[in-house]
Amino acid sequence: MRKQKKILTIAWAAVVIAIIALSGCAKDDTVVVGNSVLVTKTVSLSTDLVPLLSANCAKSGCHVKGSIAPDLEAGTAFDQLTSMGLVSTNAPANSIVYQYMIGVKTPAMPMNASGNPGNINGYMLAWITQGAKNN
């Protein structure tokens, strides 16, 4: 009887340890939308998103200072996106900026871009989902 109790205790301990270990092994799967590629890393505004915004949005006549709001240039993108109410960390997929990017709101952005350049949609949604940090 003592031996069975010891074996049962060891078995339960192993199960508890396995559950704890497995619960710590999770990816940061943040988004799968339309033609977006799954983003499984922490998205940095400055190193991941700003280069995509610069290449596709912050162009002359578009989202730059003195043109169409928001100004998505490197030095102003964070303040513009967050202060203008364009991101919602409570409901990331309902963020206004994201709604424009996926074409729910028109005109679809980035303007005159074919599809989803550089997976900009996936990166934007992942960044918002991860808390829209100034990182």
Image: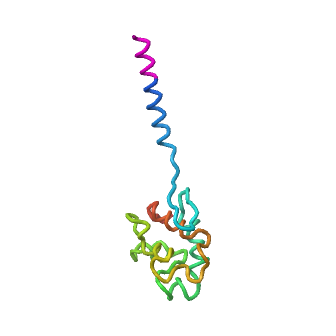
User: Is-magenta flag for residue 3?
Assistant: yes
Location of residue 2 in the rendering, given as x and y in whole percent from the top left corner: 40, 11
Residue drawn at 55 percent across, 60 percent down: 39
Q: Residue at x 44, y 32 (%)?
A: 16
**In the image: residue 20, left or right of residue 110:** left
- Where is residue 126 drawn, in percent x and y? 50, 63
| Above or below 71: residue 38 | above
Question: Majority secondary structure of the magenta segment?
Answer: helix
In percent of width and height, residue 123 lies at 54, 66
Q: Is residue 89 magenta?
A: no
The quadrant holding residue 13 is top left
Q: State the scheme by which the image is colored.
A: rainbow
Q: Residue furthest top?
A: 1
Asked where in the image residue 105 lies, by quadrant, the reply is bottom left
Left or right placement of residue 24 versus residue 85 in this view:
right
Residue situated in front as seen by the camera: 43 or 93: 93
Q: Quadrant of the N terminus?
A: top left
Which residue is most to the front?
Answer: 34
Q: Quadrant of residue 117?
A: bottom right
Along the viewing direction, whichever of 65 and 40 lies nearer the viewer = 40
Number of numbered labels in the structure image: 0
Residue under the image location 39 percent in, 74 percent down: 85
Q: Nearer the viewer, residue 122 or 45?
A: 122
| Stretch of the chain drawn in magenta | 1-10
Residue 34 placement (x, y as % from top left): 54, 67
